C-alpha cells in the first residue's frame, strides 16, 4: 500500500546507471581523497559547459559561494547589501559574516522573487548600496531583465543565488549567468547533490581565481606558509565532486521529472478554487520546478493542512519565512509592502522528490483535495 510509504519533499536521487559510484571509485583508485583534485577540476568544467558560463570555482557549500562572492565585490564592514527577503537564511547570513548591513527587498506576485519596483525604491533610498542578491526560489527565475537593468543603471553588482534553480532558464539563458556572480548549491535536498557543496560561476576570471585563493587558506606564493590575507577552508572535496559529475549526467532527467510533477499537481488542483500554484510557467522563463509550491486562499488552513498530511506520512513545509520577519534580522530595513509576508502566510511546498511515482503524487493530490 502507498499509504505507509513516506512521501518526502526532496531527497538525494542517484542515477540508476551508477555513474556516481563509478566516478567515486575512480577517485578512490587514484587516491585523490582530498579537497581539490582532478574530479573537482572536471566538475567545474562540466558545470561551465552545462550553464554556458566562463569560469567556476567549486566550494564546500552554497553559503561559502555567497560569502566569497561578497568578498570578491569588496563588501566591508558597514556596507549596504540589498537581499531578497523571501529566501533561506543562507542567502543573507554571509552579509553578516562581513559585518555589512542587509536591506531586505520584498517579492512580487508574478515571480515570488525580488520585486523590481521595490528594488528601484531601495536604490533611491540607499544610493550607496554595494551589492544586490537576488534569489530564484523553488527554481522560478526572478525578473532578470528588469533587475539586471536596474543594477546596471545604478552600477551595482548583482549576485544571483541560483542554489535552487540549477537547470532553470530565463529567456533561454541559464539562471546564475546574468549577474556578476551566480552561486549554486549541491546540498542533499537540491535537484542534484554532491552530498554537500557549492559553486560560483562568473565571467570574471580574476575574481574566480581570487576566490580559489581565499578558499584554500589564502596561501601566498612562497615556499613557507605565508599569508597576507585571511583565508578559509572552503574547497570542495574530490570525492564530492565525483558524485557531482555522476549527478550532472542525469540533471536534465531530474529537471524533466520535477516539471512533470508540477504538471500533475497543476492538473490535480485545477478544480480546487482554494489552491493556486507557484508561477513556474507563467512568464518568459523555464523553471526546474525544484519544489512545487502552492498558496491557499485561507491562511488559517496552512498549518492544519500540513498536520493533516503528516498523518498520511506526506511531508510538506511552509514557504521560507521572510528575513525581515526573522528575530535575528528584525532591526534591519525592509523595502516593500506585504507580498512576501502574504506568500509566507498562505504558502506550502509539496513533495517534489524526483523518485516519486505518479501514483504517489496522485495520492497527495487526493489527500489535499479531501482536506478542503
Ligand atoms: C540551499 C540554499 C542555500 C545554501 O546552500 P548550502 O549549499 O546549503 O550552503 C542558499 N540559498 C538558497 C536559496 C538555498 O536554497
Image (cartoon, grey):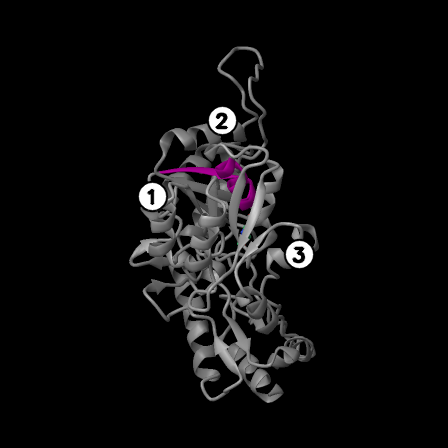
Percent position of residue 94, x then y:
58, 42
In primary-sequence order, the first of circles 1 and 3 is 1
Picture residue at 44% right of the left edge, 33% below the top: 38
Percent position of residue 253, x then y:
39, 62
Res 181 label: none
Percent position of residue 56, x then y:
41, 38
Res 53 label: 1
The one nearer the camera, 288 or 157, is 157
Q: Is residue 208 positioned above or below 362 on the image?
A: above
Are the residues tagged 2 and 1 within 8 Å (C-beta)?
no
Picture residue at 62% right of the left edge, 86% below the top: 371
Percent position of residue 280, x then y:
41, 68
The one nearer the camera, 366 or 119, is 119
The local crowd at label 1, few if under 14, some if 14 to 19, many if 20 or more residues have their Cα within 10 Å, is some
- The segment highlighted magenta reads 55-70
- Determine if residue 168 is in view: yes
Observer-side mark, 3 or 2, equals 3
Residue 132 included in the magenta stretch of the image? no
Res 213 label: 2
Res 326 label: 3
Amino acid at each position: 500500500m502507498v499509504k505507509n510509504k513516506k512521501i518526502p519533499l526532496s531527497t538525494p536521487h542517484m542515477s540508476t546507471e551508477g555513474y556516481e559510484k563509478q566516478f567515486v571509485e575512480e577517485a578512490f583508485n587514484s587516491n585523490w581523497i582530498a579537497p581539490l583534485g582532478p574530479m573537482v577540476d572536471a566538475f567545474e568544467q562540466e558545470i561551465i559547459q552545462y550553464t554556458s558560463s566562463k569560469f567556476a570555482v567549486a566550494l564546500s557549500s552554497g553559503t561559502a559561494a555567497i560569502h566569497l562572492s561578497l568578498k570578491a565585490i569588496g563588501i566591508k564592514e558597514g556596507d549596504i547589501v540589498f537581499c531578497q527577503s523571501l529566501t533561506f537564511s543562507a542567502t543573507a547570513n554571509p552579509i553578516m559574516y562581513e559585518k555589512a548591513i542587509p536591506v531586505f527587498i520584498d517579492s512580487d506576485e508574478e515571480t515570488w522573487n525580488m520585486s523590481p519596483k521595490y528594488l528601484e525604491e531601495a536604490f533611491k533610498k540607499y544610493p550607496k548600496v554595494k551589492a544586490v542578491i537576488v534569489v530564484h526560489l523553488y527554481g522560478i527565475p526572478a525578473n532578470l531583465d528588469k533587475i539586471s537593468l536596474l543594477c546596471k543603471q545604478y552600477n551595482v553588482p548583482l549576485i544571483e543565488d541560483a542554489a535552487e534553480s540549477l537547470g532553470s532558464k530565463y529567456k533561454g539563458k541559464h539562471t546564475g549567468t546574468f549577474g556578476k556572480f551566480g552561486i549554486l548549491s549541491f546540498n542533499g535536498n537540491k535537484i542534484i547533490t554532491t552530498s554537500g557543496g557549492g559553486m560560483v560561476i562568473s565571467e570574471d576570471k580574476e575574481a574566480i581565481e581570487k576566490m580559489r585563493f581565499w578558499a584554500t587558506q589564502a596561501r601566498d606564493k612562497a615556499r613557507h606558509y605565508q599569508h597576507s590575507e585571511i583565508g578559509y577552508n572552503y574547497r570542495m572535496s574530490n570525492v564530492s565532486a565525483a558524485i557531482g559529475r555522476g549527478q550532472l549526467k542525469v540533471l536534465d532527467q531530474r529537471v524533466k521529472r520535477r516539471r512533470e510533477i508540477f504538471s500533475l499537481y497543476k492538473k490535480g488542483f485545477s478544480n480546487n478554487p482554494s489552491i493556486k500554484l507557484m508561477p513556474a510557467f507563467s512568464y518568459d522563463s523555464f523553471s526546474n520546478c525544484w519544489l512545487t509550491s502552492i498558496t491557499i486562499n485561507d491562511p488559517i488552513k496552512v498549518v492544519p493542512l500540513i498536520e493533516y498530511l503528516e498523518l498520511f506520512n506526506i511531508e510538506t513545509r511552509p514557504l521560507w519565512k521572510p528575513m525581515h520577519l526573522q528575530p535575528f534580522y528584525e532591526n534591519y530595513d525592509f523595502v516593500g509592502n506585504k507580498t512576501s509576508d502574504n506568500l509566507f502566510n498562505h504558502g506550502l511546498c509539496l513533495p517534489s522528490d524526483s523518485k516519486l511515482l505518479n501514483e504517489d503524487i496522485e495520492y497527495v493530490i487526493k489527500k489535499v483535495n479531501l482536506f478542503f
